[in-house]
Image: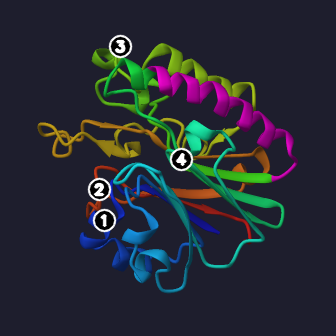
Amino acid sequence: MRVVTLNLNGIRSAFAKGFPSWLARQRADVVCLQEIKAQAADMTAKMLNPSGYYGYFHYAEKKGYSGVGIYARRQPDQVIEGLGIKDIDAEGRYIELAFGNLSVVSVYLPSGSSGEHRQAAKFRFLKRFFAHLAKLARSGREVVLCGDWNIAHREIDLKNWKSNQKNSGFLPEERAWITRVFDELRWVDVYRRLYPEAAGEGYTWWSNRGQAWAKNVGWRIDYQISTRKIGAKAVKASIYKTRRFSDHAPLSVDYDWNL
């Protein structure tokens, strides 16, 4: 089973940059999308259901903002849109597809970089999302949870870690939160399990400012995390950087698992 995750920074923009033709070559079983920045009325037939895929989406109420989706080769047994939390769901941040005892989730965590009010909203999200992750971990289901977490976990996960210790995305409180996800709740950071020491090649996001892309001044903020059994079945991960569809790069993971 191949699972891909990508923050599109606008589905219309990514499609104009060639994302569909790349996707058609990937043989992915499930593709998780974040920050689609569209409503249902904006979506073309190809965006809704690319060739060979069924598409499922959770749109933000605000136009041109947030939103998540999943493309799947087969129809799921259940689709869960949102967390059942009004202010979070209004921003279109969570969708889950259930296939038998396996769930695949696309999630987009808030960024706090635009100001103190958004950082406060991010911390509120983290507190409530931790409870949801605990519930998922106790459910007995196997889960692959994909998305843009807007947090770099360790110093190895971003180029300029020293100068970013007081910036959103690498704050001590954020890093401690994600450590609890892995250590207390026992979720698996799939890429790090496969490549425990990989540094620069693991980055998935580069600022549009300056020469960040050219100089590989990146951050690893896009993750696939999983429950332990399926996490142990991950055999290979890759980050596609040959072409750019957004300011993020697609993260693909192959699991020795049948969807």
Q: Residue at x 44, y 30 (%)?
A: 152
Specify the amino acid type for callout 3: Lys
Q: What range of the chain is rendered magenta?
A: 120-141
Structure colour scheme? rainbow
Q: Which mark is residue 79?
A: none
Residue flagged by tag 1: what amino acid is it?
Answer: Ala
**Can residue 246 be spotted in the picture?**
yes
Do tag 3 and tag 2 residues touch (Cβ < 8 Å)? no
Alpha-carbon span between mark 2 and mark 4:
18 Å
* The image quarter in which residue 188 lies: top right
Q: Looking at the image, is mark 4 or mark 1 nearer the viewer?
A: 4
Q: Is residue 4 visible?
A: no
The quadrant in which the C terminus is found is bottom right
* Residue 180 x %, y %: 67, 23
On screen, residue 256 above or below 232:
below
- Mark positioned earlier in the residue sequence (3 or 2): 3
Query: Mark 1: which secondary structure?
Result: helix
At label 1, counting other C-alpha atoms closer than 10 Å, the crowd grade (few under 14, some 14-19, many 20 or more) is: some
In terms of secondary structure, where does tag 2 sit? loop
Query: Do the numbered discs 4 and 3 sit on residues whose CB atoms are within 8 Å?
Result: no
Q: Which mark is residue 14?
A: 1
Q: Tag on residue 93?
A: 4
Residue 185 located left or right of residue 191: right
Residue shown at the point (35%, 13%) measured from the top left: 166
Q: CA distance from mark 3 to mark 2?
A: 26 Å
**What residue lies at 71% left-to-right and 56% top-to-bottom?**
233
Which mark is first along the chain, 1 or 4?
1
Q: Which mark is residue 246?
A: 2
